[in-house]
Image: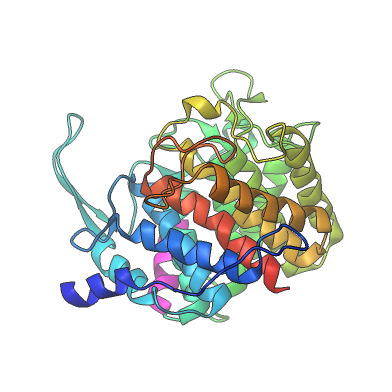
Amino acid sequence: MRLLLFCLLLLTTSAHAFESAASGKPTDSLNEARLHRAIHTLQAWYDTTTGIWNTTSWWNAANAITTLSRYTRLTGDTRYLPIIEHTFKKTRHFPVPASKDRPAWVCHHYLNDYFDDAGWWGLAWLDVYAYTHDTAYLNTAQIIFEDMITGWDTVCGGGTYWKKPNISKGAISNGLLLNLALKLWEHAPEGSTYPPIYYAAWSMQIWRWIAGSGMIGPDHLVLNGLDYQGDCKAGGTTWTYNQGVMIGALVKYWHLTKEDIYLAQAEAIADAVLTTLIHPNGVLREPHEAESNGDQIQFKGIFMRYLYDLYAVTNHQRYADFILHNADALWLHSRDEATDQIGTSWASPFDTGSAARQSSGIDALLVAVLVGRE
C-alpha cells in the first residue's frame, strides 16, 4: 500500500510548454505544466501514515483535499483520487496527541472545538461526493452540519459561533455554514432524514442573518465578524478568504434559485476585492501580508477558487484576466525555481514554502487552466 501511494505521489505530467511570441502570455499547455509541477511539489509534503500534509494545520489539510478534489472533478484527471480516498480513511477518526490543554483524544468525523475547522472538512468531502457519489462523504458532511448548527443561538439575532463553547461569531464560521447548507440542499436525497427542504430552510435563515448582520460592509467587503460581547457591531479585517467563501455561497444560491440578486451581490464583493485588495501591479494581496501566519497563507487561493465559480456563470472578462494575471505572477515571481515551491506573497520573491502556501497557489493555477480551456 505504501509503495502504491508513493508511486502515485510521484506521478506528474511531462508535457512540453512554450511561451506565445505573439501575446507574451502563457499558453494552455504551459499553464497545465505549471499546475502539474506545483501539485507534484505539494505531494512531497504528504504523509501516508497520517493522511495529511506535513507543515499544515488541520483546516489547511482540508483545503488541500478540496484542491485535489476540484482538480479531479473539474479536469477529469483521476490520478490523485487514491490520495483523496486514503486521506478519508485515515482522518475520519483522527488521533490527536496530548497538549498542554487536554489529554490525547480521537477526533471523530472531523468534529473538534472549532466550528470552522469542521466546516472546511465538510465542504471538502461534499466536493468529493459530487464526483464519486459515494454516500460516505455525504453522510460525513451531514454529521458536520448538524454539529455546526449546535452553535447557533439568538445572541446577535442568530449566527453560529467560531469556537466551542460560544466564542466569537465570525464571517468564516457562518459563511462555511451557509455553503454547507446550500450544497446539502443541492445533494441531499429526497425522502431522507434530512431532505433538501431542510437545508433550503437553513440556507434562507443563515443568509437572512448574514445579510442583516452588517458583516458585508458598505464597500461590499466582508468584515471578519461581530463584537458579540458588546453591541454586536460588525468589524475586523477584510481577509480574502471571507470574500471568497461569501462569493461561493452566493453563486451556489444563484444556481439553486436563479435569483439575480445573489449574483449581483457576489459580483459586488468580487469587484471590491479586485480594486482594493491588490498590490500596485494588480496581484491579489492579503491584508497584513508580510505578517501572514499559518492560517493567512491559505486565504488567497480560497478567494481564487470561488472567483472562478463566479466567472463560470458570468463570463466577465475582468475575472478571467485577473485569474490569469495572478497565476502568471505567482509562478514567475513567488516560486522557488529549484523546488517549484510557492511563497507567501504572489507579488514578491519566494520567502519560504509549505503545503498550505502550495495548495493556495495551486488553487490559482487550476482556475487559470480552466479559464484557458474555455
The image quadrant of residue 367 is: bottom right
Q: Quadrant of the C terminus?
A: bottom right
According to the image, what is the colour scheme of the structure?
rainbow
Residue sticking out furthest to the top: 230
Relative image position of residue 13 (x, y in whole percent): 44, 74
Give the residue furthest to the front: 21
Q: Is residue 292 magenta?
A: no
Compared with residue 297, is residue 303 higher up or lower down, i.e. above or below?
A: below
The range drawn in magenta is 135-146
Left or right placement of residue 23 versus residue 173 in this view: right
Q: Nearer the viewer, residue 165 or 292?
A: 292
Which residue sits at x=62%, y=31%?
Answer: 156
Q: Position of residue 33 (x, y in %)?
A: 52, 67
Image location (x, y in percent) of residue 202:
62, 57
Q: Residue at x 39, y 73 (%)?
A: 80
Q: Do we see residue 152 in this rendering? A: no
Give 354 or 208, whichever is nearer the viewer: 354
